[in-house]
Amino acid sequence: MDKVLEIRDLHTSFFTHVGEVKAVRGVNIDIYKGEAVGIVGESGCGKSVTSLSIMRLVPSPGKIIKGEIYFNGEDLLKKSEKEMQRIRGNRISMVFQDPMTSLNPVYTIGDQLMEPLRVHKKMDAKSARQQAIELLKAVGIPDPERRFDQYPHEFSGGMRQRVMIAMALSCQPELMIADEPTTALDVTIQAQILELLKQLKAEYNMSIMLITHDLGIVADLCSRVIVMYAGIIVEQGTTKEIFYDPKHPYTWGLLRSVPRINMLSKKRLVPIDGQPPDLLKPPKGCPFMPRCRYAMKICKEQSPELYSVSETHKAACWLLDPRAPAVRWDKEEVNFR
Amino acid sequence: MSCSNEVLIEVKELKKYFPVRGGLIGGKKEVLKAVDGVTFSIYKGETLGLVGESGCGKTTVGRTILKLYSPTSGRIIFDGDDITDLNDRQMRPYRKRMQIIFQDPYASLNPRMTVGDIIAESIDIHNIAKGEERKAIIYDLLNKVGLSKEHANRYPHEFSGGQRQRIGIARALAVNPEFIVCDEPISALDVSIQAQIVNLLEDLQDELGLTYLFIAHDLSMVKHISDRVGVMYLGKLVELAPSDELYDRPLHPYTRALLSAIPIPDPDATQQRKRIILKGDVPTPINPPSGCRFRTRCPIARERCAEEEPVTKDFGGGHMVACHFVE
Ligand SMILES: Nc1ncnc2c1ncn2[C@@H]1O[C@H](COP(=O)(O)OP(=O)(O)OP(=O)(O)O)[C@@H](O)[C@H]1O
Ligand SMILES: Nc1ncnc2c1ncn2[C@@H]1O[C@H](COP(=O)(O)OP(=O)(O)OP(=O)(O)O)[C@@H](O)[C@H]1O
Ligand code: SF4
Ligand code: SF4
Ligand SMILES: [Mg+2]
Ligand SMILES: [Mg+2]
């Protein structure tokens, strides 16, 4: 299978007045054509910054300080801004995490939807309008003809989010990066959007990089999952490997904290206690160490290497070292299965 | 949860219409019926969950109760006082008692203020504390929501989405409110922090006797946190029941579709399950369908549904449903 995206040793930092925030610290990601990969991980672990790095849209004072990002074999980090503009919203599109700030409040929804079609696909006003209305329909916006001339503030949160999705799909991108694309959607509309994405994936071989904290969506749409923590990838594998046989204590905690619909309603949830490390001075050992109940001496001193569990499954944890004590993941504690 | 029989919020036939620009057909101004006759109560110490399709009016209900929008008609009664027609000045004593945590953690924080000043905004407005005491309150709040006091001097853009939402929660807690509208407070958070925040909201409720209106899309989480849950569809409340009852015995066809679509965090189970996929046109609140508003997508709709609007009836134990054909 061909790779659509290949990220090698990406480092992105923010140079703030208090120092360098090392948001992404050596990330490697491959995404193949026609596949959907889920990226999960705690708030602040660098998911959005990774995706903004791919788009070359890291806001100042942020900077990509090292790495390569190949899109169909071409290094995006070597492209001029002009070349990037021809790729963004066209061959790679992105649904941003914050729908309100990425829609321009002074232009109508319709104008904003038509723009990529006119710029990249050189459509005339009439066909762009028609296409834009079709897109609004596809993402489940009722009465799209009338909604077309409204402004973003007249749309509900979920409707804005659907507009962002429509915009991202408008030019049939080869890669769609979706950063929490359905947080504001109810489950019926969400199911409809997931169906739409699956269909585009199958029909046009579109690849999807899906950033989400909703493990249900990952289970439904993605064939592989990448788990990030404090700017690095701590575990990756097929969706089944991650859900049924996770190896990293952070992933265990993540799976444990999800409530399940058939669980007793007043049972207390199990969060992962503590805070992620300050990325101003990331620890030299395992970043999860202060919160890990299995931490060993070495965890504090040396960051774990990436161990292979199978051809597709890797995890960065000292527990996978043959010399480490055997620790079993307590499935009973997980609220599902 | 220790919710009493005392009503804190009572909403009667609440309506909120928005004008539609350019909508002047035959000289008559068109309106968007965001909330169109909604009635419910919230008891002291209770969490009432509110779910429903995007755009069905949940946020508008929450904001109208707080009088952030002026209601088109209906009544809002807070702790026995009718606050529907109070002006801004008359509302002031109530403002402190009712707070909101917003849906969009990006748009709701002023980018030019430090986190400390954002959190202390209502403290300053209501002149609650100054100097060291004010600082102590800010640090305590930051700590409560899982941030640290070093964060007080930073600006919102320096935080991730989840961290910003925690700032929003700290801000709402600053004035010791009795009632908080939580408008998707956890949608932007990762699951482990969702669990932290939900536990935090529950602890605060136990400790301070808070009352919540909890709006969310994550039905598993709504079920977990709510005592009762209301389901809205296109400006109407179609079903309202105690939380477990609603999930075990959904009666309205829309609620059933909604529950069947909950994503399951289990790759095998999710492939096997049967979803009720809603077909038909998604209607608009500018020109809602006659009779029952769900009829354009309802799998069991009949002729009567187009002619007559279903009234809300109690099917036992406070399980309220608005449908002509509940089995
Ligand atoms: N403009 C900025 N200035 C300074 N630090 C920043 C800035 N933007 C992001 N960061 C930091 O970079 C880190 C990664 O942030 P990022 O937005 O990628 O997190 P995330 O994984 O997307 O989290 P969430 O799930 O909350 O969206 C965070 O620690 C954040 O504080
Ligand atoms: N300020 C406004 N001006 C005009 N129309 C509005 C305004 N606010 C909301 N609306 C409209 O009112 C309806 C209800 O919106 P509301 O934001 O209450 O929905 P919601 O249920 O909270 O949706 P979501 O789950 O997507 O947040 C929508 O059709 C929306 O377009
Ligand atoms: S390397 Fe050590 S501290 Fe890190 S997750 Fe594994 S056991 Fe825990
Ligand atoms: S009243 Fe009719 S259309 Fe409405 S939910 Fe019941 S059966 Fe369906
Ligand atoms: Mg993010
Ligand atoms: Mg809303």
Image (spheres, helix red, strand yellow):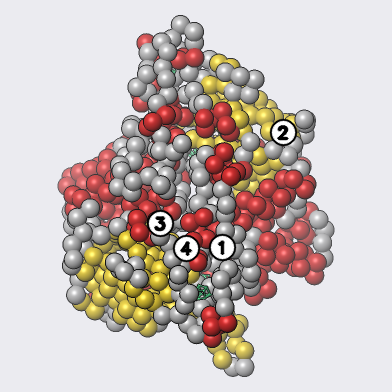
Asked if residue A322 shows in the view, the reply is: yes
Question: Residue A302 placed where, x, y %?
Answer: 45, 12
Q: CA distance from mark 2 to mark 4?
A: 38 Å
The numbered disc on residue A30 is none
Q: Residue at x 40, y 60 (%)?
A: B249
Question: Mark 3 falls within which chain?
Answer: B
To the question of a shared chain for discs 2 and 4, the answer is no
Q: Which x, y percent locates residue B251? A: 43, 66
Marks 2 and 4 in Cβ contact (< 8 Å): no
User: Are discs 2 and 1 both within one chain?
Assistant: yes
Label 3 to label 2: alpha-carbon separation? 40 Å
Disc 1 + disc 3, Cβ < 8 Å: no
Which residue is found at the position 51% from the left and 20% from the top? A316
Q: Is residue B106 placed above or below B151 in the rendered structure? A: below
User: On the picture, is A175 further left or further right than B303?
Assistant: right
Check the residue under mark 1 and report the chain it is in.
A
Q: Relative to B175, is B66 on the left or the right?
A: right
| Residue where numbered disc 4 is placed | B255
- Which residue type does callout 2 highlight? Tyr
Please check whether the numbered discs 1 and 3 fall on a single chain: no
Say whether marks 4 and 1 touch (CB < 8 Å). no
On residue A159, the disc is 1
The kind of residue tagged 1 is Met
Using the image, determine if residue B34 lies above or below residue A2.
below
Q: Which residue is mark 3?
A: B247
For the residue labelled by badge 2, is the local secondary structure a helix, a strand or a loop?
Answer: strand
Q: Amino acid at mark 4?
A: Thr
Give the mark nearer the N terminus: 2 vs 1: 2
Mark 2 lies on residue: A32
Amino acid found under the numbered disc labelled 3: Tyr
